[in-house]
Every structure is written in structure tokens, then in C-alpha cells.
Amino acid sequence: MSYCCPADPEKKKEWEEKMLQEIDFLDNSIKKASEIFSALGHPIRLKIAYFLSQRDHCVCELIFKLNERQNLVSHHLTIMKNCGIIEAYNNSKWRFYRLNPEFSDILNVISKIKPL
């Protein structure tokens, strides 16, 4: 049932509760989306996401492909990991990173954007 600003006090209370629930959901979703877009907004992190969308990589491979210092690459990986964009796992003595599958669709959309 859709109604706007009901005059009846009981219906108004129900309406206000519904509005508050929608605001809470939106605020939480927007906050998470903002964190993700912020993390992907840096060119190095976007490149890392692209490389990880192709296959899992160890840090030394990412350092080579990005032609950046190890501490800088590790810094960007930490930001992406904290946002949930990537996951890390150990294989023998090496640490590998993979793209969280939820983000492959975002990268597919980004890859279709044509430069102006």
C-alpha cells in the first residue's frame, strides 16, 4: 500500500517506521558502494583488479606488471583487501591474491567504457 504523509497517527507511525528502514538500508548500501568506488578509483588499484580478474597473482607478479615498488603495491592490495574487493591466500611460501567473484561484473562494465 502506498500513501504519503498519512494524517492518521497510527498510520503515520507505520509510515515513519517504513521510511526509517528504507533510509537505514540506503545509507548502509551507499556507504559500502562509496568505499568500493573509492578503492577502485585509483589507477593502480584498477589495474590490480583487472590483472586479478584474469587469474590469481602473487605480489612479485603484480610488482613486475605494474612496474611499481613492493611497498606501494602492498599498500594498494591492503586497501582492496579491506574493502573486500580481493582475497589473499597462501600457497607454499607465496602469498597469492584473487579477485572476489562479486566484482567481476563491475570490471566487465568498466572494460566496456570507451575513452572520450
Image (cartoon, rainbow, N blue to C red):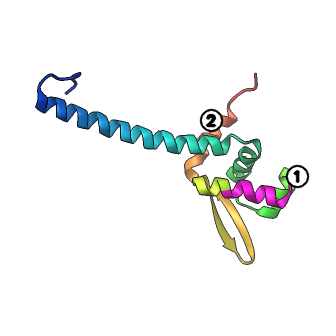
Residue that mark 1 sits on: 67
Q: Nearer the viewer, residue 95 or 39?
A: 39
Query: Is residue 18 something one can see in this rendering?
Result: yes
Q: Position of residue 66 (x, y in %)?
A: 84, 51
Give the class, few, some or many, for how many residues have Cα within 10 Å of label 1's Cα (few <14, many ≥20): few
The type of residue carrying mark 2 is Val
Q: Are marks 2 and 1 in contact (CB under 8 Å)?
A: no
Q: Residue at x 71, y 65 (%)?
A: 96
The type of residue carrying mark 1 is Asn
Number of numbered labels in the structure image: 2
Residue 81 lies in magenta, yes or no?
no
Q: Which mark is residue 105?
A: none
SS for tag 1? Answer: loop
Judged left or right of residue 14, residue 91 is right
Q: Position of residue 48 (x, y in %)?
A: 73, 50
Q: Position of residue 49 (x, y in %)?
A: 69, 49
Range of magenta residues:
67-78
Query: Is residue 55 something one can see in this rendering?
Result: no
Q: Earlier in the sequence, mark 2 or mark 1?
A: 1
Q: Residue at x 75, y 77 (%)?
A: 93
Quadrant of the image containing the N terminus: top left
Judged left or right of residue 10, residue 56 is right
Vertical order, 116 against 43 (above or below)? above
SS for tag 2? Answer: helix
Observer-side mark, 2 or 1, equals 1
Q: Quadrant of residue 41?
A: top right
Q: Residue at x 43, y 39 (%)?
A: 27
Residue that mark 2 sits on: 109
Overall secondary structure of the magenta section? helix
